[in-house]
Image: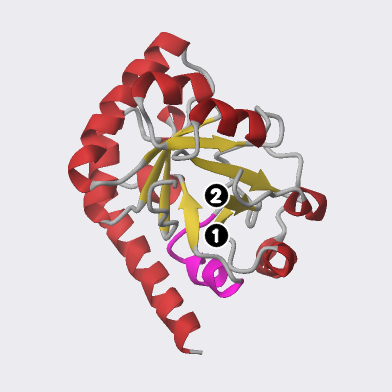
Amino acid sequence: MSPPLDLRVYAVLDPTRCRERPLAAMAAAAARGGATLVQLRDKRTRTREVVAAARAVRAALEPFAVPLLINDRVDVVLAVGAAGVHLGQDDMAPEDARRLLGRKAIIGATVHHPDEADRIESGIVDYAGIGPVFVTTSKASEDPPIGPAGLARLVARLHGRLPRFPCCGIAGITHLNAHEVIAAGTDGVAVIADIFMADDVEAATRRLRGVVDEALARKESA
């Protein structure tokens, strides 16, 4: 069994998008504000430095029982004992990651297109990050934003085959539009800049968490 998976506020920590502030301190601030999952995404740093940073972030999150995932790097997950990995379409195949990490790891996969949603296999992948929902400057993408309507279609496609499969929206999500992402059928939001580029990371996370919780409560009562 994988660790408990809570996608409500999925904080993605990127050293290029946190105003050069200490990663471990930023992770702890997000956890205090209500982040339910943290991903470390570092595409530029040398492996040894990524491992050191991941180890520090994991230690900072432990008092809050917030799981740490690593973007792409299964080797870093194994080195630091992180909770799991998030894989893009060009990264290691999920079945290979599952074989290496074991059944207890959390494995997430990015979904941009219907055929990618169709390839999600429950038991191999634990959640899907679907998007890009909105325009973002945090990551270059060849795929145009799908908007809330496109997100809803991909969620419906995924749930048509795998009912209630966990998913979150990705790209360009802030406290101002998170309610649209939840209304489209997701369980949460993956966010970089609205959390880690804020002056007060804890307060920004708390604000976002409030929006998400309200939107989920509204959806459940509808």
- How much space separates mark 2 and mark 1, taking CA atoms? 7 Å
103 or 150, nearer to the observer: 103
**Amino acid on which disc 1 is placed:** Pro
Direction from residue 56 to residue 81 in the image, left or right? right
Task: State the SS at label 1.
Answer: loop
**Residue 174 colored in magenta in the image:** yes
133 or 95, nearer to the observer: 95
173 or 120, nearer to the observer: 120
Residue 153 can be seen, yes or no: no
Q: Are marks 2 and 1 in contact (CB under 8 Å)?
A: yes
The residue wearing badge 2 is: 126
**Amino acid on which disc 2 is placed:** Asp
Q: Quadrant of residue 205?
A: bottom left
Q: Earlier in the sequence, mark 2 or mark 1?
A: 2
The percent position of residue 162, horizontal first and vertical second, equals 67, 63
Report the number of discs: 2
Q: Residue at x 65, y 53 (%)?
A: 131
- Asked if residue 77 is positioned above or below residue 140 in the image, the reply reads above
Q: Which residues are magenta?
A: 173-184
Question: Label 2 neighbourhood size at 10 Å, few (<14), some (14-19), many (20+)?
Answer: many
- Asked if residue 205 is positioned above or below residue 42 in the image, the reply reads below
The percent position of residue 82, horizontal first and vertical second, equals 38, 31
Residue 74 can be seen, yes or no: yes
**Residue 167 colored in magenta in the image:** no
210 or 106, nearer to the observer: 106
